[in-house]
Image (spheres, rainbow, N blue to C red):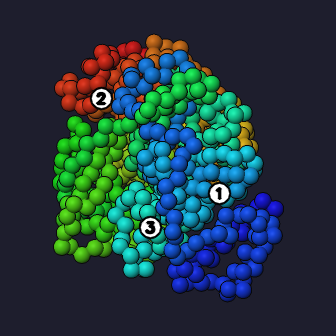
Amino acid sequence: MKNRVQELEKLIIHHKSLYYSGKPEISDHEYDALENELKKLDSENSVLNLIGSVSTNLEKVKHDQKMLSLDKVYNLEELIKWKGSDEIVSTFKVDGVSCSLIYDNGHLVLAKTRGDGSFGEDITDKVRWIEELPKTISIKEKIEIRGELYANEKNFFLLSDEMISRGLEKPTSQRNIVAGLMGRKEHLDLCRFITFMGFDVLGLNSLKTEIEKEKILSKNGFNTPRVTLHKNNNTIEEEIENARIFMSEGDYQIDGVVFTYNDILKQNELGNTAHHPRFKMAFKFMGESKTTKIQEITWQVSRNGFLTPVAEVEPVELSGAMISRVTLHNYGMVRQFELKSGDEIEIIRSGEVIPKFLSVIKSSESKFSYPKNCPSCNSDLVVKEIRLMCINEFCPGKNKEIILNFIVKIGIEDLSSKRLDELLRVGLVKTIPDLYKLTVADFMGLEKVKDKLAEKLYENIQKTKSTDLITFLSSLGITGGAYNKCEKVVHAGFDDIEKILNLTFEQLKSIDGFAEKSAEDFLQSLREKHPLIKELIQLGFEIKKEEKKQTIITDKKICITGALSEKRSVIEDKIRENGGVVVGSVSKNTDYLLTNETDPNSSKFKKALELKIPIITEEQFFKMI
């Protein structure tokens, strides 16, 4: 019954929104039948009260418990000092509009903004339009769910198109449009493009820990942010680095990480100030933004077939680095802002994160355009929501990226991108397993390859057949399968290939760092790789059990910066082989900064000097191991 109620909610929201936009798909009679069925199953369901044209809400509503701001820190040392010896929980800090939802007897009865913290505005009529938001939950007590309203990249793109089609002003930013929609008194159905992410539960006295809140929210169908439990300080830096990466690559906006004491009894003891709770702390990134000009936009085919746009810009210094390339995320971003050569744009770089586009300062006279054909295979491109996609299964660009990713991650030395291009061009390699079918004679047929190099290339490929499980998994190109994620899976007890092949959704979701969506994506992608895994094993792959080597750098955290004589991936592998831990940034918990630089220009070098972290050269590192 519950599944049918949720199905009816989504159908009614969908068809009512089409009706108000003048594009109905079903007759009034068919729509009435949907409402009547929902009335029989759940007569109090809030979807039955949807208002599509004009709302008279925006009345002030008192919060039973104040919605306070958060205290902030900008460096790891302050965060660790605040944490003390207690367990804390982290969640990504969604950059949207704060929202409070009241459920009574299992039904959504009220939604309100944060307002001034004491009084918010009634936005119930708008929130009821959010498809993914549960209108009914299993909890019968009166409770409050707090979270954030936001627009992800895909929905912002679709919303923009819909607003233009209605003659409304084109939205300019993901965050501003959410606040704008919450303040509107008409076109309420546009709120279906907004998403709610829940992170707090008030009113359940049975809860003992913060981590239990996420389980309750997920069980009742709420979207939840990435949640990680930190029993000690070692995982905190890693999560901050994950947030940095998400800021550049994620599909919705975050502006930091929120840390909360896990023990609710401790939370109650600490209480609140007039401004913020003492048991929560926001870690924010110091960001620097500047204006530059787009010289050219280039598009590259990724291994999943999506075209990634990058702006080549007039060089500008940001956070101690000279920036000449800026990520534009996807086709939706480029089309939304009609980005083109000559545009003056604002870009931002937070910490070590990849620089990203923020806004257009001044649009050029150039005509907006985007590629219609794949730059690799010349096939017609398909617009798939916010992405441009090459659907040619045999696209050489896409195929090359898949194989090249494997070569880099599995550690095949001397097989460069150019040599791979030649192998692909002459048809010796079409898939990853083909690498292991190459002979010395095959390499001899390549340009500028003689006996010794041919034998070396052959041996370099063959020796990667013996590898550890984490490296093997991370080389396969699994969605969300970066090295650190594969490491979590293996260290959670799935330490042989049979266990990996039989991994279930529930097992994966129970592993720290995997939320419902990331677990689904990882598992689906892993299952698609089963034939590849089995073929590689048939070709002689031996997956070794992980044995931590005891050396001078065992368990030491090592950060790398600057150019090295060896490829960075080779050095990272050497660190891991010798029991060390590779980290992405310098903090007081870092044991060494590895660099060949002598002039402290980089932010990592300066930070290491400031914190008196030992700085070692590549030569010193090799002597150590």
Q: Is residue 513 left or right of residue 399?
A: right
Name the residue at 41% across, 63% down: 180
**For residue 397, what is the image quadrant?**
bottom left
Q: Position of residue 260 (x, y in %)?
A: 53, 31
Q: Which mark is residue 184?
A: 3
In this view, the residue in front, 315 or 289, is 289
Q: Is residue 395 above or below residue 230?
A: below
For the N terminus, give its image quadrant. bottom right
Q: Give me the C-alpha separation between circle 2 and circle 3.
A: 46 Å
Q: Position of residue 580 (x, y in %)?
A: 47, 22
Q: Is residue 295 above or below residue 48?
A: above
Q: Which mark is residue 604?
A: 2
Pick out the residue farthest to the top.
552
Crowding around mark 1 (Cα neighbors within 10 Å: few <14, some 14 to 19, many 20+) is some
**For residue 136, what is the image quadrant?**
bottom right
Work out whether mark 2 precedes mark 3 in sequence or the reverse, and give the earlier one: 3
Q: Position of residue 172 (x, y in %)?
A: 34, 64
Q: Which mark is residue 109?
A: 1
Q: Which mark is residue 388?
A: none
Q: Give me the C-alpha separation between circle 1 and circle 2.
A: 51 Å
Q: Amino acid at mark 3?
A: Arg
In this view, the residue in front, 256 or 9, is 9
Q: Is residue 321 left or right of residue 561?
A: left
Q: Amino acid at mark 1?
A: Val
Q: Give me the C-alpha separation between circle 3 and circle 1.
A: 20 Å
